[in-house]
C-alpha cells in the first residue's frame, strides 16, 4: 500500500511540476485556478485540443473548483501569454491547442473534434499577394473531414 501511495505522490508531483514550469515559462503567477487548468492541459506531457467547456468538465471531474467564466478568462490569458494557440472553426467554435507551433489541423465534423494533421505532408506552394500596407499574420489550415458511410 505504501508503494502505491508513493507512486501516486510522484505522479501528482510530476503533473504539478510540469504545470508550474509551463506557467513560469510565460511569467504567469501560478494561482490555484491557473494550476488546476494547467495541470489538465499539460500535466501529462501530451499536446491536446480543448474547448472551454471540455476543459471545464475535465477539471470538474478531477475535483477542481473553477467556474466556466474563469476557464474562458484563463484560456484567453494563456493565449495572450503565448502558451496556447486558439483555433477557430466556423468563426464560432474555438479550440485551444497546447502545440503553439504552426501546424495544420483536421476538424472531424461528425464528432466536432480537432486533431493535428501531419505537417510534413502539407505543401503550400504560394500565397496570394497581400494588399499594400498589410502583412500576413498567420495562415491557418483546417481540413474538414467526415467519416465515409459504408
Image (cartoon, rainbow, N blue to C red):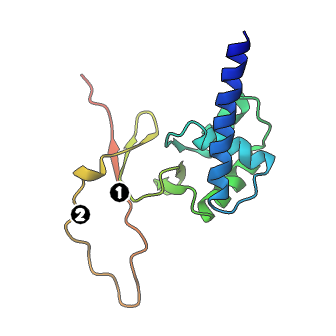
Q: Name the outermost residue toward the top.
A: 1
Which disc is residue 41 wearing?
none
x%, y% of residue 18? 62, 44
Query: Looking at the image, which residue is at 71% across and 27% down?
Result: 9
- Left or right of 89? Residue 142 is left
Q: Splitting the image into 4 quarters, where does residue 148 fall?
A: top left
Q: Looking at the figure, which quarter contains the N terminus?
A: top right
5 vs 40, nearest the viewer: 5
Q: Going from the N terminus, do you reach mark 2 or mark 1 first? A: 2
Query: Looking at the image, which residue is at 72% across and 18% down?
Result: 5
Tag 2: Cα neighbours inside 10 Å, few (<14), some, or many (≥20)?
few
Q: Tag 2's secondary structure? A: loop
Q: Looking at the figure, which quarter contains the C terminus?
A: top left
Q: Name the outermost residue toward the bottom.
A: 132
Q: CA distance from mark 2 to mark 1?
A: 10 Å
Label 2–label 1 contact, CB within 8 A: yes
Q: Is residue 57 visible?
A: no
x%, y% of residue 78? 63, 57
Query: Looking at the image, which residue is at 49% across and 55% down?
Result: 88
Circle 2 residue: 124
Which disc is residue 141 wearing?
1
Q: Splitting the image into 4 quarters, where does residue 135 fall?
A: bottom left
Q: Is residue 132 above or below residue 137?
A: below
- Left or right of 78? Residue 32 is right
Q: Tag 1's secondary structure? A: loop
Q: Name the outermost residue toward the left.
A: 125
Query: Looking at the image, which residue is at 49% across and 57% down?
Result: 91
Q: How many marks?
A: 2
Amino acid at each position: 500500500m505504501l508503494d502505491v501511495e508513493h507512486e501516486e505522490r510522484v505522479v501528482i508531483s510530476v503533473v504539478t511540476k510540469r504545470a508550474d514550469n509551463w506557467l513560469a515559462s510565460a511569467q504567469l503567477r501560478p494561482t490555484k485556478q491557473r494550476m488546476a487548468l494547467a495541470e489538465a492541459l499539460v500535466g501529462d506531457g501530451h499536446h491536446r485540443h480543448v474547448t472551454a467547456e471540455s476543459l471545464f468538465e475535465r477539471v470538474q471531474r478531477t475535483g477542481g473548483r473553477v467556474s466556466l467564466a474563469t476557464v474562458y478568462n484563463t484560456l484567453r490569458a494563456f493565449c495572450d501569454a503565448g502558451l496556447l494557440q486558439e483555433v477557430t472553426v466556423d468563426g464560432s467554435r474555438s479550440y485551444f491547442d497546447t502545440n503553439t507551433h504552426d501546424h495544420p489541423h483536421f476538424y472531424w465534423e461528425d464528432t466536432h473534434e480537432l486533431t493535428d494533421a501531419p505537417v510534413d505532408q502539407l505543401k503550400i506552394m504560394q500565397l496570394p499577394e497581400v494588399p499594400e500596407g498589410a502583412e500576413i499574420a498567420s495562415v491557418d489550415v483546417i481540413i474538414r473531414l467526415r467519416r465515409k458511410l459504408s
